Amino acid sequence: MGSSMSVSRSYDHDVAHPKHSLQREVLKIANATCGMCTRPVALNERVYRCVSSECGNFLLHDACFRLPRKMKHFKCGRLKLANTSFGNLADDPPCSICRRSMAGVSCVYIGATAKNPGFRVHPRCGALPQFVSTPHEHPVDLRESTASNSRKCID
């Protein structure tokens, strides 16, 4: 005879939410934000939610949960995903890619080279490719954002 018992698998994310178990599920609460990137999470989106009652509704986008702990980046060589919950990022320099504040972000990719000391980026910015294929008439490449080159064709 078959069993009707449902088995729930638990996951962990040692960087974003250390020492807690996460469960993969479909989001059923409104106005939720990701605990890693602080961006909104849509209803019915797949998420990883903390099962501990003390954490309220800590959750991660499926995409954020799957980000690699270490990666090679075209701008700074090796990057490592680090938990920032112990620091005050509001006073720190902005993201090295998008130049937006790091306030509220629980994890960042960090790396340093002689050319780029203190290189730190949002998790999703760190995962952006250097080049993209697009029907735009000119090649499109990722550059650091400044007031003069932000979001415009540079041809």
Image (spheres, grey):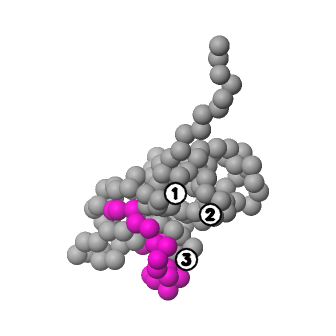
Q: Which residue is mark 2?
A: 55
Q: Which residues are magenta?
A: 79-101
For residue 66, side relative to residue 1 (left or right): left
Q: Nearer the viewer, mark 3 or mark 2?
A: 2
Query: Mark 3 or mark 2: which comes first in sequence?
Result: 2
Tell me the CA gap for discs 3 and 1: 23 Å
From what the image shows, is residue 11 above or below residue 7?
below
Residue at (43%, 57%) from the top-left corner? Answer: 14
Task: Estimate how packed mark 3 is, as few (under 14), some (14 to 19) or many (20 or more) residues with alpha carbons within 10 Å.
Answer: some
Q: Is residue 51 above or below residue 110?
A: above
In terms of secondary structure, what is the magenta stretch mainly?
loop
Q: Nearer the viewer, residue 104 or 73?
A: 104
Q: Amino acid at mark 3?
A: Ala
Q: Residues within 10 Å of mark 1 (few under 14, many from 20)?
A: some
Under mark 2, the amino acid is Cys
Dot placed on the residue nearer the N-terminal end, 1 or 2: 1
Answer whether residue 71 is magenta in the image.
Answer: no
- Contact between marks 1 and 2 (CB within 8 A): the answer is yes
Q: State yes or no: residue 99 in magenta.
A: yes
Q: Which quarter of the figure is the N terminus placed in? A: top right
Say which of 5 and 27 sits in front. 5
Q: Position of residue 119 (x, y in %)?
A: 35, 73
Asked which secondary structure carries label 3, the reply is loop
Q: Which mark is residue 78?
A: none
- Residue 144 makes an appearance in the image: no
* Image quarter of residue 41: bottom right
Q: Residue furthest top?
A: 1
Question: Percent position (x, y) of residue 9?
Answer: 55, 40
The residue that label 1 is drawn on is: 20
Q: Quadrant of residue 25?
A: top right
On residue 103, the disc is: 3
